[in-house]
């Protein structure tokens, strides 16, 4: 059996990333892939990028990575409150100021998609990795979308499984031998438990079994470090699941 770990949406949260990487290592999983969004909302954007670089982990370009790499203007999102909009602008501008040029260059060269093929016995498993969708790294696809949306993505990519992130909400959906999966978020989960989340794919010749892993980490420590930084306290409250709504 082959085991593959896929994670993403770290958002500058180095302690959460280290817990996930340690868990992957304890399980003896060698194949690791990142779906992007390394930066914004916690104080360790540079350190997260350098960790991914140092471990030579294949990583996609998330929408936050792209914005920081190319200094793309921040566009307000309709779903956000006035409070979150103000905090979001401040947090992203913090990254634009403090992410080093070397790390911005690294982000600018990340691929948009990644297609994997693993052979187990006589079976070839085709695995499509995206940040959010095939066409965009900024499309919100939730578990309650019409099945046809995910089935079309599987057909278009000619894959057995498509793994995405971006929404920070994990799910697995099964369609007659094929899977659509969101592994959730390492560093900024929108699930009520706020745990660091990633997915393991277990591949053998007969079947593919996904496993969502959710881990506790030192969230209060991270919240306190956010409060000590120039990043708005909104993101500390978010990690504590206080005062902010999950949208």
Image (cartoon, rainbow, N blue to C red):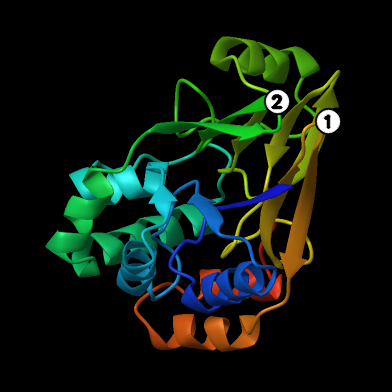
Given contact means CB atoms under 8 Å apart, are the residues at marks 1 and 2 in contact?
yes
Q: Nearer the viewer, residue 120 or 193?
A: 120
- Picture quarter containing residue 122? top right
Where residue 123 is drawn, which disc sits there? 2
Q: Residue at x 77, y 39 (%)?
A: 204
- Secondary structure of the residue carrying tag 1 is loop
Q: Position of residue 201 (x, y in %)?
A: 71, 46
How many other residues sit within 10 Å of disc 2, few (<14), some (14-19) or many (≥20)? some
Q: Nearer the viewer, residue 1 or 11?
A: 1
How many other residues sit within 10 Å of disc 1, few (<14), some (14-19) or many (≥20)? few
Q: Is residue 61 above or below residue 191?
A: above
- Secondary structure of the residue carrying tag 2 is strand
Look at the image and tell me whether residue 207 can be seen.
yes
Q: Residue at x 20, y 43 (%)?
A: 70
Q: Is residue 153 above or below residue 111?
A: above
Kindly report the distance in space between the C-alpha atoms of the residues bearing marks 1 and 2: 8 Å
Q: Nearer the viewer, residue 201 or 19?
A: 201
Where residue 206 is drawn, which disc sits there? 1
Query: Is 133 placed left or right of 177 in the picture?
Result: left
Q: Position of residue 167 (x, y in %)?
A: 61, 43
Q: Position of residue 52 (x, y in %)?
A: 38, 63
Query: Is 96 placed left or right of 135 in the picture?
Result: left
């Amino acid at each position: 059996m082959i085991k593959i770990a896929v994670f993403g949406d770290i958002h500058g949260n180095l302690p959460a990333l280290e817990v996930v990487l340690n868990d992957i290592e304890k399980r003896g999983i060698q194949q690791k892939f990142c779906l992007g969004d390394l930066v914004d909302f916690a104080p360790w954007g540079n350190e997260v990028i350098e960790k991914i670089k140092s471990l030579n982990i294949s990583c996609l370009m998330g929408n936050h990575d792209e914005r920081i790499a190319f200094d793309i203007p921040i566009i307000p999102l309709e779903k956000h409150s006035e409070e979150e909009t103000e905090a979001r602008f401040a947090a992203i501008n913090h990254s634009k100021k403090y992410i080093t040029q070397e790390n911005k260059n690294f982000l600018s060269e990340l691929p948009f998609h990644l297609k994997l093929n693993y052979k187990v016995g006589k079976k070839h498993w085709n695995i499509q990795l995206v940040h959010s969708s095939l066409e965009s790294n900024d499309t919100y696809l939730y578990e309650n979308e019409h099945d046809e949306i995910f089935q079309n993505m599987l057909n278009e990519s000619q894959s057995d499984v498509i793994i995405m992130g971006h929404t920070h909400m994990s799910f697995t959906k099964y369609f007659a031998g094929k899977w659509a999966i969101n592994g959730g978020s390492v560093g900024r989960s929108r699930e009520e438990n706020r745990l660091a989340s990633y997915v393991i794919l277990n591949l053998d010749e007969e079947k593919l079994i996904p496993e969502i892993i959710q881990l506790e980490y030192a969230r209060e420590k991270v919240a306190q470090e956010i409060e000590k930084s120039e990043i708005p306290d909104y993101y500390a409250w978010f990690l504590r699941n206080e005062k902010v709504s999950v949208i």
